[in-house]
Image: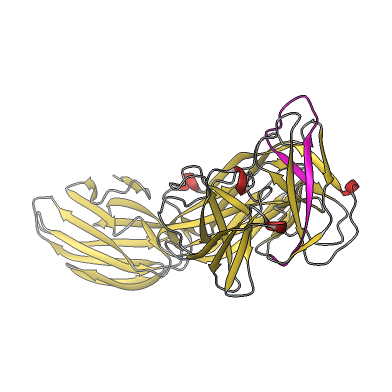
Amino acid sequence: MQLLLVLLAGCFAAGMRADAQGFGLTSSVSSPLVLTNTAFVYTITLTNFTGSVQANMFVTNTFSASISLVGTANSAGTNDIEGASVVFSVQALSNNAAAIMSVTNFTSNVGFLTNTIVTGIFGATNLTSVIIVQVASSFSDLGVQITPPIQPVITNDLIFYDVIVTNNGPGSTPGVMLTNEFPPGVILKSASQSFSLNGQNLIFNVGTLAAGGSADVRLFIQPTNVGTLTLVAAVGALGLVDPNPTNNTFVTTDVFVSAYSDGLLTAVTNSPQTNNLQSGLLEQTVLLSNIGPSNALAARLVVTGLTNQLLNAVGTNGTSPFVYLSAPLPAGQSVTLVLQYPRKSFPFTNGQLHAFSMPSAPIWTPARVTSTSTNVNISKIIKLNGGWNNGRMLIEFTNIVGRTYTVVYSDDASFSNAMIAPPTVSSGANRVQWLDYGPPATKSAPANSPARFYRVYQTP
């Protein structure tokens, strides 16, 4: 009589038993999932239920893959090594007595290791047990997530998104590989890490990721077609057993690319280029007008053909920088925007200004506004009077050279409607003076608000 027992990884039950002609065979393994080069133990128990003493029995333990033997034990006899097998000799076994045998080993091979146990009594009665163990190089819960851009995306905008890989443990995982796919109609500009490219699929070698660790890959792209971008990222590692594979793939369709909305917005310069002695920048004001029949939710002013840098730009469309009016512009109304350049005059014409109504307003909601104090000490807030800066607010704070800072403003002290004032601020000195000059940095000029409160955060 022959009986076959199979124990599969993930549904393992210790003490599986087969009986034949008064004998019982149980076999188990210390874990159905083991890591490479980590010792694990097979335990084999042969029990005599015949009612009398039995002698000259044997148990053969055979491996289907290369293993390294650490040790063996036999409570009722001797052991012999025969190739890939360990043969246990059970010299005598009383009624209801059990012989307990064990094999301790490890392997460097990734995959499934099959262990076959065969028991022979008098060369006639056989009991067979098969145990399958999964061998992995690591055991960890890897995950991946895509953080898409939150601002409105127009065709030919230069944008970026982040792909974040996490290792939730419990072990460290070597050889982590990240793949990221984006649809046709998207131009890849660059990435924060090196990669290999297969069509629209980027492959990143993340390397070893410790338990609790993460890696952030930032991709810079330029979408050229109107529509929804489907971005797909997946993470894995050779020889990895992941207990939670559901978070190994992430798909997002949160990026919608639109064209500039139809509308009649015009923009013309309404001041000369003037050096602002307070900020040290060259400034020029632009009158943005809505001459169309409907209100604009927000507006974008794109500047083309620049021979100088637009310092307060918040994005680039193609090769042209742009600023936002982050507030609605009703039909028949106008607003003044301030453009800032390095302090050197240059030729500029109204033909370089292109104003567009936006399909949605930009999102400048800050991540942190709940605390009652800033994480950067504001040493001075002054309302300026007279001259070019009349009605503007001056904010002064200390900073660390080489770091960037985000200014947050609100018209109430609780910061319930706080917004970021773009772009971020940096300085080569240890003290910064920042001017609230109104649009495009803030939704409206400080003089048009009953009160204005500020906080400054160091950008991570």
Q: Is residue 223 left or right of residue 390?
A: right
Name the quadrant containing residue 292.
top right
Q: Tell me where the magenta segment starts and ends, as one range.
A: 279-301
Task: Work out which residue is located at the far front of the displayed protein and give it.
Answer: 386
The answer to whether residue 332 is above or below residue 422 is above
**Coloring basis for residues:** secondary structure
Residue 287: say if magenta.
Answer: yes
Residue 332: say if magenta.
Answer: no
Q: Provide residue 358's location: percent of width, then percent of height.
A: 72, 36
Name the residue nearer the viewer: 395 or 259.
395
Q: Quadrant of the N terminus?
A: top left
Q: How many marks?
A: 0
Q: Is residue 55 visible?
A: no
Name the residue nearer the viewer: 409 or 258.
409
The answer to whether residue 281 is above or below residue 126 is below
Residue at figure coordinates x 34%, y 46% from the top left: 11
The answer to whether residue 195 is above or below residue 355 is below
Name the quadrant containing residue 405.
bottom right
Q: Provide residue 459's location: percent of width, then percent of height.
A: 55, 62
Name the residue nearer the viewer: 21 or 86.
86
Q: Is residue 334 visible?
A: yes
Q: Is residue 429 left or right of residue 212?
A: right
Name the quadrant containing residue 272.
bottom right
Residue at figure coordinates x 59%, y 74% from the top left: 401
Residue at figure coordinates x 20%, y 46% from the top left: 21
Q: Is residue 22 left or right of residue 320?
A: left
Q: Provide residue 458's location: percent of width, then percent of height.
A: 52, 63
